[in-house]
Amino acid sequence: MKISRCCPFVPAITAGLLCLLMAAPVAAHPGSLWGIDLTSVLTMRDQARVVAHHHHKEHSDQLDDQVADLNQIRTVVIDPGHGGTNIGAVGIAGIPEKRLTLELAYQLREELQQKYPRLRVVLTRYWDTTVELEDRAEIANLANADLFLSLHYNAASHQRAVGFETFFLNANQALSSFEEEEEFAGEIEGVAHSSHTLELIQFDLLRAHRHELSAELAELIQHRFVRRIDSVDRGVKQGNFSVLRNAEMPAVVVEAGFMTHPEEGLEILTREHRSRITTSLIEAIEDFDVVLDEQLHDPEPADEEEAPVADGISLR
Ligand SMILES: [Zn+2]
């Protein structure tokens, strides 16, 4: 079926958009048929819910006290791993990882939204669609996310591997590009050079801080998992994940259990197991909110005393 035959509005659609429609392998799913990205429609619905809530709030002062809020975290981006042509791992149950991660993401979103109606929760995909790894972080950047959770289930070539683990980007990947940019800065001369170097140093400090926060977030998640999930604690690890590299906020990859383990591979299919994961993640988000809050109100004294200096120019 040609798209042009079933759509009377085609002349109104720009040529570029039409090209996109024709070229997209996912054109078969209803969301893209008319050039409407249902993902953004759903996000709009999320925002509409926030607006509706604010409206409701204005007309009901009593409700105000009952609604919980996080202190620092306003937007959470949840990334259901894989999707579309990238099915992820397939465990002993024969169900592809992409389906399990989407189900987990929806449940987490629902529970987060129930507990914190004013929190903005955005998913990087809402359907079984292919989303490039770089685009996932970019969605989080565009959404101005305060944290980014990429949800996955694990797989191994043997059936013994079991348990949960949380990754953050390894230091080399998270911090190395500074040198590349410094080289680039070296090519610029004079005043431009100093100010550019200054920007780079500020940028690098931000990046180092974000790296530390990602490590902290991973620790908090793992800590909560240990309390709720009766399986092996595989710990916090650093990894080279493309999905995390461009994220401009604290970001982690959660591996919530082994699909290939004879018992765990079946357990992770249950709502109970998903609930243990989502409850842990919500607790970890709350813990992390406290960390962010403390940092804001009680910054480390070292920052106060020693201002970083670049080319003799104080950063403050
Ligand atoms: Zn995965």
Image (cartoon, rainbow, N blue to C red):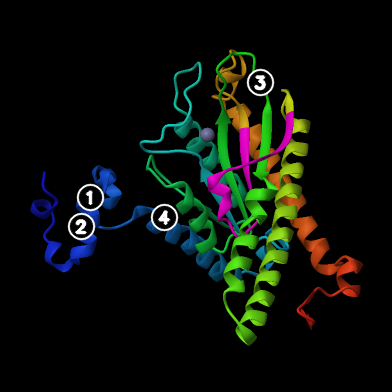
Secondary structure beneath disc 3? loop
Which residue corresponds to mark 1? Answer: 23
For marks 2 and 3, give the CA distance: 45 Å
Secondary structure beneath disc 4? helix
The answer to whether residue 59 of the structure is visible from this angle is no
| Residue 43 falls in image quadrant | bottom left
| Image position, residue 70 (x, y; %) | 71, 59
Specify the label residue 308 is tagged with.
none
Q: Tell me the quarter of the image containing the N terminus.
A: top left
Specify the label residue 19 is tagged with.
2
Q: Which residues are magenta?
A: 234-255
Inspect the image, locate mark 4, and give the three-letter code of the amino acid beneath it: Leu
Inspect the image, locate mark 2, and give the three-letter code of the amino acid beneath it: Cys
For marks 3 and 1, give the CA distance: 41 Å
For marks 1 and 2, give the CA distance: 6 Å
| Image position, residue 220 (x, y; %) | 76, 44
Which label lies toward us, 3 or 4?
3
